Image (cartoon, rainbow, N blue to C red):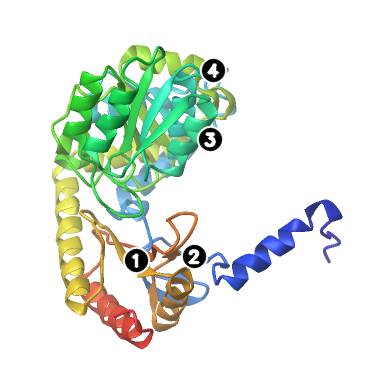
Amino acid sequence: MSTTVTRPQLQFLHQALEDLKSKHQYFHLRVLEGEQKPIATFDGKEVINLSSNNYLGLTTHPKLRRAAIQAIRKYGVGSGAVRTITGTMKIHLDLEDQIARFKKVEACVVFQSGFTANAGTVSALLGKEDLIVSDELNHASIIDGCRLSRATIKVFKHKDVADCERVLKETENWNGRKLLITDGVFSMDGDIADLPALCSLAEKYNCIMMVDDAHSSGVLGARGRGTIDHHNCHGRVDIQVGTLSKAVGALGGYVCGSRELIEFLYHRARPFLFSTSHPPSVAATCEAAFEVLDSEAGERLIKKLWSNTKFFKRKLKKLGFNTGKSETPITPIMVGEAEKAFDFSRELFSAGVLAMAIGFPTVPEGKARLRTIITATHKRADLERAAEIIGSVGKKLGIV
């Protein structure tokens, strides 16, 4: 029996949790029992899973499973150290070379997560004399990296190229380094950055250009190479960040760019310096994932992903739902008030659909939503049934 009690110093936590409950924003973690699949069991209930980042279904791909098992047999279960001591294994370097070739850049370094890749890179490159110009809807990992750098941060309106140029023009004579940074695909709205225009501004105003391609790697561009490939901006982006945790199906993040950039991050990126490197099984799994991506099988999966996405969006719009400005498999169902969004999510789960509610502070107040993500492995019957349930519950709650 537990004897832990909340000490007086932490009594504020109780009130904070009660406030969340009063706003209907308190939640329990949904527990997955089994594999991350389109039909999955959470909290003992089988549901249609519309909340997974497993875009291509690679979390359960036979080739990735085999690679992980073989790596454990050959190398063991852990690397034993940080990269700068004894934790750099040949399999890590092989993976980084593979990603660099895939992304058509000179070099790559793998981090423990996409979050640490963003936060570690920005905070390593910029200091208090420098300037960061950032889209207002950039991911939290970018925001945290910007804050850690102690640079001056200027925010431009979401995807507003004119407002971005206004900020750059006002700071044209800045003495320090300047970084222009954007998500490639925005994680809550599913829209795509106007990368060609931003690259032109970075060139015009002498900025380092950085893109977080977490939600576009494996989704956009030839064989899932991301927004840089999608927009044909090769050679115009200095720093590309990606994830190994979404379409790639495993765990981690990476940074791509010049060899000198990567060498610098070896020496200054704190997550790289102070975190144990990936288990060899994870590195091997990621290698197998990129082999799948860079093949005809990968092309077929991406084609199916987009076919399913278009089908589901049409269904939702026909039912009268507002899917915002989405241009990708990230398909928000806009609700507005957080209380109603969380009620919607709970009712859907009871009816057999997992679609998680997103509220403040992840999205602005008054813009709560369900964020659904379509995958290549959803069957049309799954999506038909999910749309039918969403329509029925949406009408019951007065959302449509």
Q: Amino acid at mark 2?
A: Leu
Quadrant assignment, res 67: top left
Q: For marks 2 and 1, give the one nearer the viewer.
A: 1
- Amino acid of disc 1: Leu
> Does label 4 or label 1 sit earlier along the sequence?
1
Question: Label 4 neighbourhood size at 10 Å, few (<14), some (14-19), many (20+)?
Answer: some
Q: Is residue 156 above or below residue 337?
A: above
SS category of the residue bearing label 4? loop
Q: Secondary structure at mark 2?
A: loop
* Of residues 118 and 43, the one drawn nearer to the viewer in this rendering: 118
Q: CA distance from mark 3 to mark 2?
A: 27 Å
* SS state under label 3: loop
Q: Amino acid at mark 3?
A: Gly
Labels in figure, total: 4
Q: Is residue 50 above or below residue 138?
A: below
Amino acid bearing label 4 = Thr
Q: Percent position (x, y) of residue 12?
A: 75, 57
The residue beneath circle 2 is 32
Label 1 sits on a secondary structure element that is: loop
How far apart are the two marked residues, 4 and 3, measured between alpha carbons? 20 Å
If you read the primary sequence from the N terminus, does the residue marked by circle 2 or circle 1 appear first? 2
Name the residue at the bottom extreme: 396
For marks 4 and 1, give the one nearer the viewer.
1
Q: Which residue is mark 4?
A: 84
- Residue 351: quadrant of the picture: bottom left
Image quarter in which the C terminus is found: bottom left
Query: Which residue is denoted by mark 1 in the rendering?
Result: 50
